[in-house]
Amino acid sequence: MGVLGQQLLNGLVTGSAYALIALGYTMVYGVLQLINFAHGEIYMVGAFVGLLLVTVVKLPFLAALPLAMLAAALVGVTVEFVAYRPLRRSSRLAVLISAIGMSIFLQNVALWIFGPATRSFPPPFQVSVLQIGPLRTNTLALLTLGVALVMMVGLHYLVRHTKTGKAMRAVAQDRDTAALMGINVNRTIALTFLIGSSLAAAAGVMVGMLFNAVVPTMGVMPGLKGFVAAVLGGIGNIPGAMLGGIVLGLAETMGVALLSSQWRDAIAFAILILVLLYKPSGLLGARVEEKV
């Protein structure tokens, strides 16, 4: 029982990071019907900015985290303005190609600036090992889980109970009608990218500190797994993205415990295939029938 509980705890920590990444995917898809494949690189940008703020500028964690989120959010808004806004009325294939191109561009810019070597990301505070009954963890893992939960709850409140959230939901439902009702569509879409990118950056900072490693290619696999989590929960559904991230983290951790760490990535993509085959709308997504 203690081993199972330990794996569940580890899965919750991993899944909370996936959930933060998945929220960015699902927010953008909900508003624009677009998969932002540059989202994993936004996660990487947040990790590198956090690393520089902590190790070079010597800022405390409480200052470095929001500044890293802000920097990545500005990069996300710039990506939307440069790569997606001019193609808003184009085919989905054109937008998909632009997204992949932006992902490759950001990754290569990071490689040019920082080089290919993995950089150490020491936490800016003393990490203590905690023993909770049969479970063993540390303060950094619990902080990662806590930050993720607070941000997920805060996002849910913003989308469901604020004027900004109502504007996002209106643009997601019908962009042209929302514009006729006086909603600034461009600003709402930019704000969606800003919020989604900031959540990915928070995940990048926390994961970078948790594993004490940051590298320019670090966003590739977490970005893909964040997409899997969004599809699993129901792409375009915010509670679904949260649930999908947690379920994916738990499935991955339990799969590794039962099989081998070599199966970690395969488990995520096996889940994606099963969801697409048997429940393409996701766990919480609603099936939408197109009228002919």
Image (cartoon, helix red, strand yellow):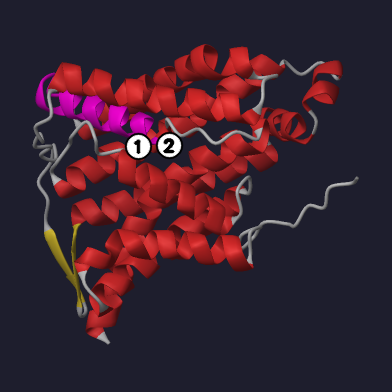
Q: Position of residue 150 (x, y in %)?
A: 44, 47
Could you tell me if the residues under marks 1 and 2 are in contact, i.e. CB atoms within 8 Å?
yes
Q: Amino acid at mark 1?
A: Ala
What residue is drawn where x is 34% and y is 31%? 41
* Magenta region, residue range: 40-58
How far apart, in angstroms, are the residues tagged by discs 1 and 2? Answer: 5 Å
Q: Position of residue 98 (x, y in %)?
A: 50, 22
Foreground pick, 268 / 25: 268
233 left or right of 141 in image: right
Give the main secondary structure of the magenta stretch. Answer: helix
178 left or right of 87 in image: right
Find residue 185 and report its image quarter: top right
Disc 2 target residue: 199
Magenta includes 110? no
Q: Position of residue 136 (x, y in %)?
A: 17, 70
Q: Secondary structure at mark 1?
A: helix
Disc 1 target residue: 202
Q: Amino acid at mark 2?
A: Leu
What residue is drawn where x is 63% and y is 30%? 92
Foreground pick, 19 / 111: 111
Check the image and name the residue furthest to the bottom.
1
